[in-house]
Image (cartoon, rainbow, N blue to C red):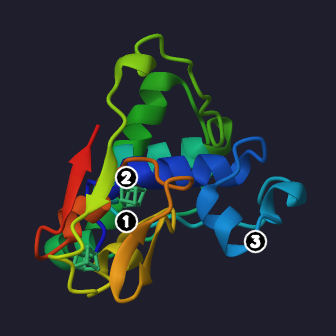
Amino acid sequence: MGGPWSVPIMNGLIFRMRHADRPISYLFSKTQGKFPKGGPVTIPIVPSGGVRSGSDVIQYMMMGGDAVQVCAQVILEGVQVAGRIQKEMGDWMTRKGYSKIDDFRGTARLLEAPQAASIPQWLPVVDKAKCTGCERCVKACPNVALSLHDKKAQLDERFCEGCRTCFYVCPVNAISLSE
Ligand code: SF4
Ligand code: SF4
């Protein structure tokens, strides 16, 4: 289930699909390491998850998305959500001086934040005694860093980015976070 929490995750995924020098570990693991040689993804990317406002759509476009999918917000607000989002995007584009989406599509860049080194890097720790093998964390991990072994969740630290999604979805609190 998408939501506001998924926007930064999707932003990272779209960005890395459009930039071959930042291979996305999810695709990397799914293709047995063959992905980075293929270069950036050139087919249309249609992100979904957490799209509630013009700001969300603009972020996905700046990362390199071609269109977006809106689902939950249509259920909550009705089909008029499309008009509201369009107006919010139009207002923002007017303020910024853009006349069309292609003027800012794919313009996001990585900044080397000087404070990044001080941000804690969390890694999930699975309490195997508590783990029921329900696989929720395995399915929720955006980087395929978790898999089931002997019916218990197991982490592959090479792929984990510390997003904490697994921590939040585990129904029996079998996952804790260690620094
Ligand atoms: S914190 Fe959990 S969900 Fe996030 S990348 Fe690591 S294993 Fe996957
Ligand atoms: S969500 Fe929790 S109980 Fe389910 S497999 Fe993952 S760690 Fe185990």
* Label 1 CA crowd tier, 10 Å (few <14, some 14–19, many 20+): many
Q: How many marks?
A: 3
Measure the alpha-carbon separation of dots 3 and 1: 27 Å
Q: Name the residue: 21% across, 67% down.
A: 127
Label 1 SS? loop
Residue annotated with mark 2: 7
Q: Are marks 2 and 1 in contact (CB under 8 Å)?
A: yes
Q: Name the residue: 46% across, 44% down.
A: 58
Residue 92, quarter of picture: top left
102 above or below 41? Answer: above
Which sits in the foreground, 36 or 76?
Answer: 36
User: Is 116 on the left or on the right of 5, as rendered?
Assistant: right
* Residue 49: image tag: 1
Q: Residue 13: give x, y in percent of width and height.
A: 55, 54
Residue annotated with mark 3: 32
Measure the alpha-carbon separation of dots 2 and 1: 7 Å
For the residue marked with disc 3, what is the amino acid?
Gln
| Residue 60 in view of the camera | no
For the residue marked with disc 2, what is the amino acid?
Val
